[in-house]
Image (tube, grey):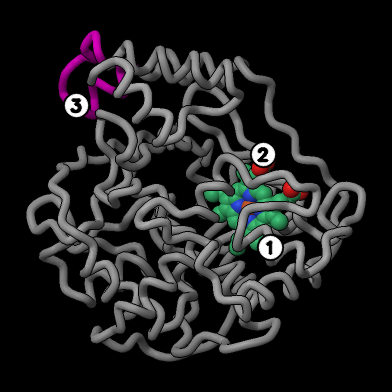
Amino acid sequence: MHIRRLTLLAGVIIMLVALAILLGTAASAASGGAGDPVKGQYIFAAAGGCGCHGVNLAGYNPSGPPFGEIFTGPFGSVPASNITSDKDTGVGNWTDAQLMDAIRNGVDDGGHTLFPIMPYMTLHFMSDADVADLVAFLRTVPAVSNKVPERQLNGSAPTVPPLPPSPATAPASGLARGKYLATVVGDCNACHTPQTPQGAPDMSKMLAGGVVAREGGTFEVGPNITTDGPTGIGYWTGQDIVTYLKQGIGPNGRTADGLMGEAVAGGFRRLGFNQLTDQDAVAIAAWLKTVPAVRNVPKAPPAGGPSAAGADSAWAPQFQALHGRPPAAQDIADREWSLAFAAAHGQPPSPADWMAHWQQTGQ
Ligand code: HEC
């Protein structure tokens, strides 16, 4: 899958501050290493499977899925990193402390600030134990050699504003647990909260529906999941929400599609929301039931609008910048196929669609 968020630099900075204020307090210095990979696998799944990094977690690759995302916008272009244990092209040589720093503080092994599309300002509020476990799990991900191209920024990466210390422990149960899983680990806001014109999440309309731009000038709507009856999911029971998160089937019988389908099903080893324990899924549902109702129907910009044109004219130069060569005939053919697919189906091809396409065309 290729998502392209229309996030502006200013918006990103506002978002960092907003999230810091929203998610608040709790204090303790980060402890080091020695996590539990089994617990870490659960956190990975509760995070929806870190899908931007691709189903093999080897990051962006010009050949497309099953590899990861590339994000383009006014800020430049930022490919998702290879987070497998490959020593040359992945994070196999990083220390535990470096990995934890990247996840929670947005600093890479060379001390550079990561571009905040990597949601470290949200994951900052992950507990010491959870992040140590997650790192231990990442160590078990098989190495995949994939050299991800350097990011191309039109400025410097925004500096990280002072954030409160990360929490030592995560809430174990109840509403606090549900809020933690939804707003920190599962990052529901990323797709379900509308953005201001500057691209920052509009927290006055938390979870009232968001729009995510995807490759090919198409958009995906993250529905309103506040407690509003007419426009949200006020009429869903807690059990409806639990079933949806774990099985991807809503009370109306509709299955979770697109990005939500991927977060539920998971990419790497099918690790996604489907793995949530009953207790945790119930906690998320219970917390969602406390979210203030906001009447809002998120609307996607008209397909084929200015962003679609922008995406197209920007594509060849972007490709050139990333790969150091102009797109070859095969790259253009793949690109055209994915655009046609998106036009026909209302969403870009999934990794499975790509694989079927490659099989058919003998690639
Ligand atoms: C990567 C983006 C993304 C993330 C993260 C995400 N969602 Fe979704 N969600 C979507 C999209 C897109 C849909 C619409 C799916 C469809 O139309 O089939 C959706 C649909 C839903 C629905 C069904 C709403 C309806 O009216 O049909 C619920 C409930 C939901 N999500 C809850 C959550 C919760 C809770 C979280 C966090 C734990 C979450 N989502 C995280 C993108 C996301």
Quarter of the picture holding the N terminus: top left
Instruction: Provide the residue designation for mark 1.
Output: 243
Q: CA distance from mark 1 to mark 2?
A: 21 Å
Q: Amino acid at mark 3?
A: His
For label 2, the SS is strand
On whether ligand 1 comes within 8 Å of the CB at mark 2, the answer is: yes
Q: Is residue 360 magenta?
A: no
Q: Which mark is residue 323?
A: 3
Q: Nearer the viewer, mark 2 or mark 3?
A: 2
The amino acid marked with disc number 1 is Thr
Q: Which mark is residue 221?
A: 2
Which sits earlier in the primary sequence, circle 2 or circle 3? 2
Secondary structure beneath label 3: helix
> Within 8 Å: ligand 1 and the Cβ of disc 1?
no
Q: Residue at x 34, y 40 (%)?
A: 78
Q: Is residue 353 visible?
A: yes
Q: Amino acid at mark 2?
A: Val
Give left or right: position of 280 versus 351. right
Query: Mostly what secondary structure, the magenta segment?
Result: helix
Instruction: Single out the residue that lies furthest toward the right.
Output: 230
